Amino acid sequence: MTIPVDRLSEPAVRAFVEALNSGDRDAFMAVLRPGATMSDEGSDRDLADWTDKEIFSSRGHMEVESESDEGRSLVARYRNETWGEMRTTWRFTVENGKIARFETRQA
């Protein structure tokens, strides 16, 4: 069972997932704070390079299975054209309504 994106609790995370799923790079970047950071599998990555490779050029898509921590932690099925589908966790740091950091890894 999945949670519809429009029912996600945290507005910034909801906007992040909506932009990711629609492939809208401008909307995606608009939800991030200037200087936002991210990590994948526990290693910090260059946010622009990672999002281009793992989301936008490979048609990334997220189906949220559950949320916790007031909507700042997700378990989701994530798929893209590079890696196929995998179960993942996502944790978000939200500051002043924007995402300052996100961390993802396989669940």
Image (spheres, rainbow, N blue to C red):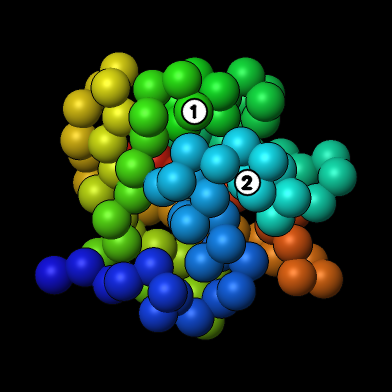
Image position of 47 (left or right of 106): right
Considering depth in this image, is 6 or 66 the residue closer to the camera?
A: 6
The residue that label 2 is drawn on is 28
What type is the residue that disc 2 sits on? Phe
Visible residue check, residue 43 = no
Residue 43 vs residue 54: left or right? right
**Callout 1: SS:** helix
- Compared with 17, 69 (above or below) is below
Write the residue at 31% across / 71% down.
Answer: 4
- Choose the circle earlier in sequence order: 2 or 1: 2
User: Which residue does the image show at 30% across and 29% down from the upper left?
Assistant: 80
Q: Please report contact status of discs 2 and 1: CB closer than 8 Å, yes or no.
A: yes
Q: Position of residue 24 (x, y in %)?
A: 56, 41
Mark 1 residue type: Phe
Name the quadrant containing residue 49. Answer: top right
Furthest residue to the right?
34
Q: Position of residue 43 (x, y in %)?
A: 56, 29
List the residue tagged with mark 1: 56
Q: Position of residue 47 (x, y in %)?
A: 66, 30
Q: Is residue 30 above or below residue 97?
A: above
Q: Which mark is residue 82?
A: none
Residue 67 in view, yes or no: yes
Q: CA distance from mark 2 to mark 1?
A: 10 Å
Q: In the rendered image, which quarter contains the N terminus?
A: bottom left
Query: Label 1 crowding class (10 Å Cα cut-off): few <14, some 14-19, many 20+?
Result: some
Q: Position of residue 63 (x, y in %)?
A: 28, 55
Query: Would you place residue 33 above or below residue 7 in this image?
Result: above
On the picture, is 2 further left or further right than 10? left
> What residue do we see at 38% from left, 35% from top?
60
Callout 2 environment at 10 Å: few (<14), some (14 to 19), or many (20+)?
some
